[in-house]
Amino acid sequence: MDFNVNSDFQLNLLWKKRGTEIIVATLPSQVKGRSLFIHHTDLRCLRPHLWLTGEIIQGLLHLSAFTYNVVDTIYLMDYYTAGVLLFGDRATTRRHTLPKVNFDNFDGILSFVHVNKNHWNMLYIHAKSGTVYQMDPSPASSELEDSTHAAQRLQEYLKIRKHQGKTDWVDVKWKGGVMPHPVQMDGCSCGVIVVEMARAVMEAFPEFPKMNFSTKRRAMEEARRDMALQVLESSVFDEETCSMCGADKPPGQAPPVTDWIQCDNCDRWFHNLCVNMDQNKLKELKKRQWLCVLCR
Ligand SMILES: [Zn+2]
Ligand SMILES: [Zn+2]
């Protein structure tokens, strides 16, 4: 079975199966040469009424940046760093200042952060107007306060970077802003709405977006399915890498010879070590049919 064709069929299968840690999609990212791995469990969280993982939101944001052609204009900050920027203590912040990134090469930053328990907000930094938006899908939000706080934190973040010799964006006076957007009508789709808001931002960039997507139950379900299909269809299948660890060499202390085994159903490749298979078992199984955990 070739899993690049008929992604609809493939998606139904992947959603039905109990979650595994297999990499089901390898997505291109803004950083050349660094792919993003989407695991089976990440893809499954797009099913209706589930909370999205950071990995799936991140993957979708990078895909959208290619769709809307903003890969070179909007910096997609990873959500861990965005969390440190907004909420980290000084010591942690000093360790996450992105020394290799020059913000002057970009006109904005898009990211998302984890707030409270299991809730996603979008973070949007518009450099030209010096405005920071922390956008909360929840109807009961305090966006002006949140955005103002985020703007102060950004100013401090850039000051810390300045101490480390980076002077990009330090002369901008940042302020918090709000913009209208649809709000969530259920308790689980904050991540889906963050992706939709981010897409609207990218599509309109550098102008301000009009956000008028629906957040009704049916629309959210459709959006989730479309997103999952987009992930599967955008996957760049790489035969050189292991579908369990995502690397060409197995992790940890590797033996001098790396052995591989291929699933006879889906054609994915695995390091024998990554599927807990020793040399003897591998030899034995190579003579017979072998199915990966996804296809068993
Ligand atoms: Zn591996
Ligand atoms: Zn398989």
Image (tube, helix red, strand yellow):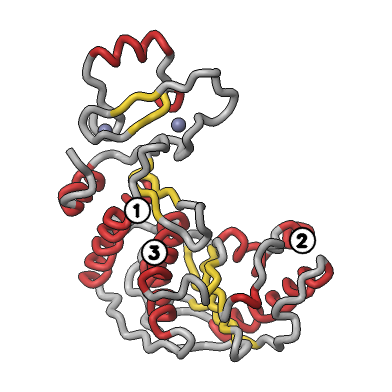
Left or right of residue 253: residue 58: left
The mark nearer the N terminus, 1 or 3, is 1
Query: Which of the two labelled residues, at mark 3 and mark 2, occupies the earlier sequence position?
Result: 3
Q: Position of residue 234 (x, y in %)?
A: 31, 57
Q: Residues within 10 Å of mark 3 (few under 14, many from 20)?
A: many
Residue of label 1:
45
Up-down relation of residue 268 to residue 236 (above or below): above
Residue nearest the observer in this picture, 259 or 95 = 259
| 3D distance between C-alphas at marks 1 and 2 | 33 Å
Instruction: Return the residue nearer the eye: 295 or 220.
Output: 295
Which quadrant of the figure has residue 273? top left
In terms of depth relative to the viewer, which is nearer, 19 or 250?
250
Disc 1 to disc 2: CB gap under 8 Å? no
Looking at the figure, which quarter contains the C terminus?
top left
Name the spot of residue 281 as percent of width and height, x first: 36, 11
* Mark nearer the viewer, 3 or 2: 3
What residue appears at the point 80 percent right and 72 percent down from the top-left corner? 162
Quadrant (top left, top right, bottom left, bottom right) of the N terminus: top left
Badge 2 crowding class, 10 Å Cα cut-off, few under 14, some 14 to 19, many 20 or more, is some
Q: Secondary structure at mark 1?
A: loop
Residue designated by label 3? 63
Answer with mark 1 or mark 2, whichever residue precedes in sequence. Answer: 1
Where on the picture, by quarter, is residue 138?
A: bottom left
Disc on res. 94 = 2
Q: Residue at x 39, y 8 (%)?
A: 280
Q: Quadrant of residue 155?
A: bottom right
What amino acid type is highlighted by mark number 3? Leu
Nearer the observer: mark 1 or 2; the answer is: 2
Distance in Å between CA atoms under marks 3 and 2: 29 Å
Q: Nearer the viewer, mark 1 or mark 3?
A: 3
Q: Which type of secondary structure does the marked residue at label 2 adopt?
A: helix
